[in-house]
Image (cartoon, rainbow, N blue to C red):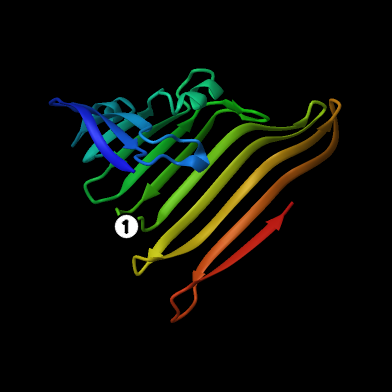
Amino acid sequence: MTLSYQNFDKGFFNSRFQMQMTFDNGAPDLNIKPGQKVVFDVDVEHGPLPITMLMHGNVIPALAAAKVNLVNNELTQPLFIAAKNKSPVEATLRFAFGGSFSTTLDVAPAEYGKFSFGEGQFTFNGDGSSLSNLDIEGKVEDIVLQLSPMNKVTAKSFTIDSLARLEEKKFPVGESESKFNQINIINHGEDVAQIDAFVAKTRLDRVKDKDYINVQSHLRT
């Protein structure tokens, strides 16, 4: 895979360019042909006071802010079709002078075969490029899995809350919780089962004086 940049346009307040990832040898397992590309439009606002952030009332100085959009092309077109010709994902990034960063990922409603969901948003906040103290929060609304023409499973929302850090810059440790809320199993238009929540918790701990991680997982309803 080759990462490259093109169409760079540098201005005083902002800069624009395209970032592209080219699959030189393709990826047969993913039905990606050699030479196909994933392309992103990137719009960067220069610091110390990016204009868009000022418009949203954020007056904290920042190194830069950027908005990243997926480009509709031969490879990504199915994602746009699933999202009804809207951009399936849009990312907003902010980089602080101290090395911390924050990213907001907006997900458009989409339908992929028998699986569909509504709007979603995920946030990623970290202390630096080493991804220390990485905090992830996210939510997706109105999840539907169509099992057959007469049977489906729905969930009002899916949420995730995770806090992790790297010990000695190589050992990921922390906790995460993923939850499906208000689950309904529907048969011929009628609810046959309801679950308030299905929760999965995971904890990663480094074993004392050892170079490996202990993983604990718990499921509950």
Q: Residue at x 33, y 54 (%)?
A: 127
Q: Nearer the viewer, residue 64 or 82?
A: 82
Residue indicated by mark 1:
130
Image spot of residue 5 (x, y percent): 23, 34
Mark 1 nearby-residue class (10 Å; few <14, some 14–19, many ≥20): some
Q: Position of residue 34 (x, y in %)?
A: 39, 36
Decide which of 34, 161 is in the foreground and name it. 34
Specify the amino acid type for callout 1. Answer: Ser
From the top left corner, tell me how far across and down residue 202 is, in percent.
Answer: 58, 60
In the rendered image of this protein, does residue 221 appear above or below residue 89?
below
Q: Dot 1 lies on which element?
A: loop
Residue in the image at 45% along x and 28% along y: 76
Relative to residue 220, is residue 207 depicted above or below? below
The outermost residue toward the bottom is 209
Horizontal side of residue 190 vs 56, given as left or right? right
**Which x, y percent locates residue 84?**
54, 18
Q: Nearer the viewer, residue 60 or 212?
A: 212
Task: Give the residue displayed 30% in from the left and 25% down from the top.
Answer: 55
Q: Quadrant of residue 14?
A: top left
Q: Relative to the observer, which residue lies in front, 205 or 89?
A: 89
**In the figure, is residue 137 to the left or right of 220?**
left
Observer able to see residue 155: yes
How many numbered callouts? Answer: 1
* Farthest-out residue, top: 85
Outermost residue, left side: 12
Q: Residue at x 57, y 35 (%)?
A: 140
Let me know if residue 58 appears in the view: no
Q: In which quadrant of the rendered view does residue 146 lie?
A: top right
Quarter of the image for the N terminus: give it.
top left
